[in-house]
Image: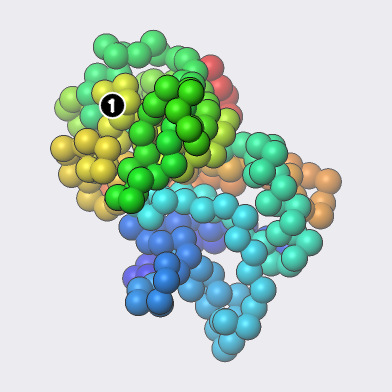
């Protein structure tokens, strides 16, 4: 990891950070490359990074940037994980997509699709509900009012209500609006780093305090570099 760890919140129970695009959340197989988990462990204990307790309660795809939270105790891990399992954790994403969204979809709405598990190449597909192993994916969306965008692109604000693999990427691509840079799902435009999908905000109940926490991840420098100027809108004002 070449850039400093960006901490959004930390106490004795949990740690919220902003994940850069292109970085694995956790090591995959043999430790041949750095991951966000490595950076978090080093932050928690520079002298003994592998000795600290670190509970993983959710993940972001490698090319995706944005908010991710870790548990620092087993109790916090159980309580946070339960919120993700029961869909009490609320997530808000931003996406830059190829195409004119307003010509393809209503300005606000709800997507409901049945998705396959990833195939051997890691690709998820939209299928009929009766297909074996298909699972329902639900996302509320809004076409965002950006002040400046790359020509031929659109900005989507997304609130997933389920947590399927590649859910937002697949659902947008199925409507002819692939996320910029996401060649796996048909995008042809390059993006400076990773893909143009950003976990903008996360709202969750604190694992020990009786409080609701909302963390917002700053937009990566790659977005204005690509020509996007986006307004600061409240993360959970949904259509």
Query: Residue 19 location in percent, x, y?
Result: 45, 56
Q: Give above or below for 45 relative to 98.
A: below
- In this image, 165 relative to 149: left or right? right
Residue 33 at x, y percent in the picture:
35, 73
In the image, farthest residue toward the bottom: 47
- Quadrant where the image shows the N terminus: bottom left
Instruction: Tell me the residue that label 1 is attached to.
Output: 177
Which sits in the foreground, 49 or 139?
A: 139
Q: Nearer the viewer, residue 46 or 117?
A: 117
Q: In this rendering, is residue 50 above or below 160?
A: below
Identified at 40% across, 76% down, the residue is 30
| Residue 227 quadrant | top left
Residue 142 lies in quadrant: top left
Q: Nearer the viewer, residue 192 or 111?
A: 111
Instruction: Confirm whether residue 5 shows in the render.
Output: no
Residue shown at 22%/50% (left/top)? 192
Q: Indicate the colouring scheme.
A: rainbow
Asked which secondary structure carries label 1, the reply is: loop
Say if 162 sits above or below 64 in the image. Answer: above
Residue 81 percent across, percent down from the top left = 68, 51
- Can residue 76 be seen here? The reply is yes
Q: Residue at x 22, y 24 (%)?
A: 99
Percent x, y for residue 171?
Answer: 39, 29
Q: Residue at x 35, y 45 (%)?
A: 119
Q: Is residue 134 above or below residue 50?
A: above
Residues packed near mark 1 inside 10 Å, few (<14), some (14 to 19) or many (20 plus): many
Whether residue 185 sits left or right of residue 74 in the image: it is left
């Amino acid at each position: 990891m070449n850039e400093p760890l960006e901490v959004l919140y930390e106490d004795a129970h949990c740690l919220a950070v902003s994940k850069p695009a292109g970085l694995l959340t956790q090591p995959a197989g043999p430790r041949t490359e750095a991951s966000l988990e490595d950076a978090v462990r080093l932050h928690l204990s520079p002298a003994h990074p592998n000795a600290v307790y670190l509970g993983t309660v959710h993940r972001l795809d490698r090319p995706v940037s944005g908010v991710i939270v870790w548990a620092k105790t087993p109790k916090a891990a159980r309580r946070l994980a339960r919120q993700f399992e029961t869909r009490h954790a609320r997530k808000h994403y931003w996406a830059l997509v190829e195409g004119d969204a307003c010509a393809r979809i209503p300005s606000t709405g709800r997507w409901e699709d049945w998705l396959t598990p990833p195939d051997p190449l890691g690709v998820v597909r939209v299928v009929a509900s009766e297909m074996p192993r298909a699972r329902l994916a639900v996302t509320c969306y809004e076409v965002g009012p950006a002040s400046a965008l790359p020509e031929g692109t659109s900005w989507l604000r997304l609130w997933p209500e389920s947590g399927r693999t590649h859910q937002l990427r697949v659902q947008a691509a199925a409507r002819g609006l692939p996320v910029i840079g996401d060649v796996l799902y048909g995008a042809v435009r390059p993006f400076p780093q990773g893909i143009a999908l950003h976990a903008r905000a996360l709202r969750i109940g604190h694992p020990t305090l009786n409080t609701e926490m909302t963390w917002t991840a700053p937009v990566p420098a790659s977005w204005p570099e690509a020509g996007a100027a986006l307004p600061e809108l409240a993360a959970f004002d949904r259509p």
